[in-house]
Image (cartoon, grey):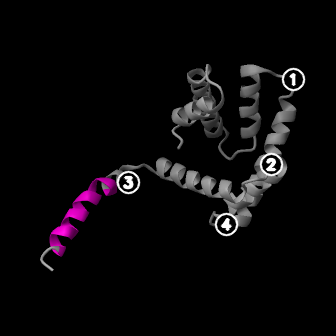
Amino acid sequence: MKYIVPLIAAALLAAAPAVRAQAQKGPDEQRREKMRAAYTQAEKACEGKQGTERRDCMMKEMCAQSKDAKACEERMSRMKDSARSARAACEGKRGEEHDECMVKEMCAQAKDAAKCEQAGRQRLARREKIREACKDKRGEELKACIRSESGGK
């Protein structure tokens, strides 16, 4: 009995840095972690499927984990339609011109187009930074580089 109190105190002290580290995470980091966990779970559920079947499975699994699955699926469907029309509008353009066109077309229907375009440009910059850092790598080494540069697993 006399050893329980020090044991509990030691356990609390050991857990304190982890609790403080979690409390310091911003809402963006927490959202990314939730998305990574949901994506990992969806990957396991859709293992062995390929192509359209895998994409549909991943969408259903990701939406099944959201608060409102039906709204999520409708949102994903709208995004797919928007991407399809953006690809059609930007067909024939290459490189940076194509990237810029895609951002503008994808954000044309957004509630806050300026904010959407800014986020799109940030994604493009992040993607370019990853490409530059991993340009000489191939295969598993490339995958590992992309994961480390993007802050993944």
What secondary structure is marked by label 1? Answer: loop
Q: What x and y, as percent, mark residue 65?
A: 64, 64
Instruction: Give the residues drawn in magenta, as a range.
Output: 4-19
**Residue 82 percent location from the top left of the image:** 80, 44
Q: Nearer the viewer, residue 67 or 33?
A: 33
Q: Can you give x and y, in whole percent of width and height, for residue 110 in the image?
A: 70, 45
Q: Does label 1 or label 2 sit earlier along the sequence?
A: 2
Q: Earlier in the sequence, mark 4 or mark 2?
A: 2
Q: Is residue 46 left or right of residue 18?
A: right
Amino acid beneath label 4: Asp
The numbered dot on residue 22 is 3
Quarter-wise, where is residue 134 in the image? top right
What kind of secondary structure does the magenta stretch mostly adopt?
Answer: helix
- Quadrant assignment for the N terminus: bottom left
Q: Which residue is mark 2?
A: 50
> Looking at the rendering, which quadrant does residue 152 occupy?
top right
Q: Residues within 10 Å of mark 2 (few under 14, many from 20)?
A: few
